[in-house]
Amino acid sequence: METKIKAIHFDATEKLQLFINKKVEKLVKHHEEISDVEVNLKVVKPETAMNKEASIKLLVPQRDDLYASKVADTFEEAVDQCVDALKRQLEKGKDR
C-alpha cells in the first residue's frame, strides 16, 4: 500500500505525516487489498476555528474508490474522523 500525502499551500510537519501514516495503516486491517491512499490537507479559511480540512481517498481493486472529507480544529482530528468514516464504509462493503 502506498500513501501519498499532499499539503495544499503549506508544508506538513514530519510529525503530522507520521500520524497520518499510522492511522491509515490501521485501515488495512479492515481490507487487505487497499492499493493506494491519497491524503489531501488544506486550510479552508485562515484565522477561524474549524478551518483544517482533510480528505482521504482509498483505491481498492475490484471496488469503487472510497472517499471521506472532514473539517476540524486540527488536522489530526480531521484525519481521525476521516479514518472512522472510511472504516464504516469498508465494513459496509464487506457485508454485501
Image (cartoon, rainbow, N blue to C red):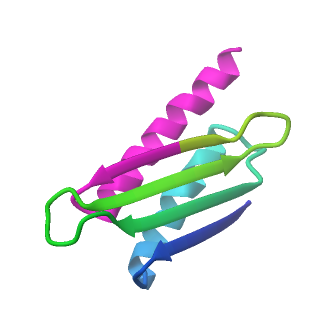
Q: Position of residue 70 (x, y in %)?
A: 37, 48
| Quadrant the N terminus occupies | bottom right
- Image check: 46 left or right of 90? left
Q: Residue furthest front?
A: 45
Residue 24 in magenta stretch: no
The location of residue 84, given as percent across then percent down, is: 44, 40
Comparing 55 with 28, the one in front is: 55
Q: Characterize the magenta stretch by its predominant secondary structure.
A: helix
Q: Is residue 72 left or right of residue 57?
A: left
Judge whether 79 appears above or below 68 on screen.
below
Q: In the image as oriented, which residue stretches furthest toward the top? A: 96
Q: Position of residue 39 (x, y in %)?
A: 55, 62
Q: Does 80 appear in magenta?
A: yes
Quadrant in the picture for the C terminus: top right
Q: Is residue 71 left or right of residue 82?
A: left
Q: How many marks?
A: 0
What's the magenta region?
68-96
Q: Is residue 26 left or right of residue 84?
A: right
Q: Residue at x 20, y 56 (%)?
A: 50
Location of residue 12 in the rendering, given as x and y in whole percent from the top left corner? 42, 80
Q: Residue at x 63, y 40 (%)?
A: 66
The residue at the far right in this view is 62
Can you tell which quarter of the image residue 63 is in? top right
Corner quadrant of residue 48: bottom left
Q: Is residue 93 above or below residue 87?
A: above
